[in-house]
Image: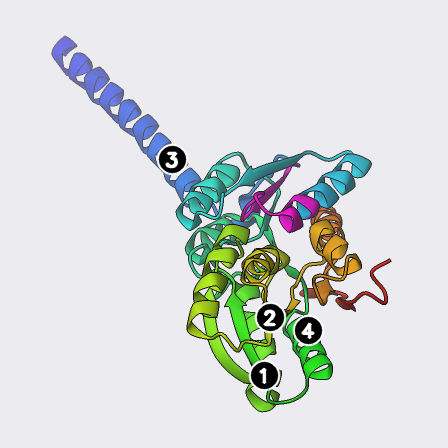
């Protein structure tokens, strides 16, 4: 009889341990497969910026930080340094810190898609700033009308030099939506009204802009105008043009301080003002609205303006 009681007690102990283990397994499984509805953010906003080695994005971050400071919310900024792979790791790190809203300014609009989709699946609210995230349904896109801006810039070239003029294009970083859209805007006008004799990427970089422009001038000595997809490349191109002692109209995009100064000095022809500080501030304000449970617009455009010597201030 005693042996039967001992056996029963042993069986009861084993069953109890099994139940506890099963409960633990269920809890772990629930954590691993928690849906978006279970996500609890930290209340912080994460901002993954493509690079801060560019005045435009420095101003964008400054605008975002000013808005965050005014609202009293935490903004965590990570700089990808124009490295798409690093940006993926940066976003993974922000999500692991349970940011409530992720603001993404992609290096490459395709490369970030998977990691942004993972964030959305977890329950993180996502906003894109200046450049889109391809193939992902996010909460809001905040950007200038890059196509319209490039059309304005290219039409200015037509107005200044005339139809049929020989022009060159300095493209931005391959895969960046801003580069794609500005290229589209340029060709919408140039392919019908101008003679595009050269078109090469210079990755939104001033030094590369100078080098690419030097090569273009060696191959095409009769270039009359240049459209650069940002001011950094435009300013680099102007250095190459100055060294060649040629008189070539240069139009950029972004309205950085250096570009505006050059326009005032009568060197650079024109640029497109995007208001990067407003893009950054609008992104943070929209993030706060999302954290408060408000419904926001899927797309918020920020006005662009052609800046010439007449309105450069």
Of labels 4 and 2, earlier in sequence is 4
Q: CA distance from mark 3 to mark 1?
A: 59 Å
Does any portion of residue 265 appear in the rendered image? yes
Q: Are marks 3 and 1 in contact (CB under 8 Å)?
A: no
Q: CA distance from mark 3 to mark 4?
A: 57 Å
Crowding near the residue tagged with mark 2, few <14, some 14–19, many ≥20 C-alpha atoms within 10 Å? many
Q: Where in the figure is residue 106, as x and y percent of width and height?
A: 52, 54
Q: Which residue is denoted by mark 3 in the rendering?
A: 28
Q: Are marks 4 and 2 in contact (CB under 8 Å)?
A: yes
Quadrant containing the C terminus is: bottom right
Q: Where in the figure is residue 49, as x and y percent of width and height?
A: 57, 46
Is 49 magenta? The answer is yes
Of residues 259 and 8, the one drawn nearer to the viewer in this rendering = 259
Of labels 4 and 1, earlier in sequence is 4
Figure label count: 4
**Marker disc for residue 21:** none
Q: CA distance from mark 4 to mark 2?
A: 8 Å
């Amino acid at each position: 009889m005693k042996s039967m009681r001992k056996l029963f007690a042993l069986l009861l102990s084993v069953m109890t341990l099994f139940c506890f283990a099963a409960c633990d397994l269920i809890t772990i499984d629930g954590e691993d497969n928690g849906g978006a509805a279970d996500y609890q953010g930290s209340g912080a906003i994460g901002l993954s910026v493509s690079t801060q080695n560019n005045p435009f994005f420095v101003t964008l971050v400054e605008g975002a930080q000013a808005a965050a400071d005014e609202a009293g919310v935490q903004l965590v900024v990570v700089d990808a340094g124009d490295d798409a792979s690093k940006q993926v790791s940066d976003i993974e790190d922000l999500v692991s810190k349970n940011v409530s809203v992720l603001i993404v300014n992609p290096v490459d609009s395709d490369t970030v898609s998977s990691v942004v989709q993972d964030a959305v699946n977890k329950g993180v609210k996502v906003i894109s700033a200046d450049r889109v995230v391809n193939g992902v349904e996010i909460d809001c896109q905040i950007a200038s009308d890059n196509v319209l801006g490039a059309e304005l810039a290219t039409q200015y070239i037509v107005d200044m030099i005339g139809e049929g003029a020989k022009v060159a294009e300095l493209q931005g970083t391959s895969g960046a939506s801003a580069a794609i859209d500005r290229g589209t805007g340029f060709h919408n006008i140039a392919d019908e009204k101008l003679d595009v004799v050269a078109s090469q990427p210079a990755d939104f970089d001033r030094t590369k802009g100078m080098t690419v422009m030097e090569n273009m001038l060696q191959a095409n000595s009769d270039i009359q105008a240049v459209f650069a997809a940002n001011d950094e490349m435009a300013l680099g191109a102007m250095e190459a043009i100055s060294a060649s002692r040629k008189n070539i109209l240069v139009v950029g995009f972004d309205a950085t301080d250096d570009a505006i100064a050059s326009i005032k000095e009568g060197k650079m022809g024109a640029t497109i003002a995007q208001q990067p500080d407003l893009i950054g501030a609008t992104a943070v304000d929209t993030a706060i609205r999302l954290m408060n449970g408000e419904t926001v617009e899927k797309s918020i455009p920020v006005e662009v303006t052609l800046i010439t010597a007449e309105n450069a201030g």
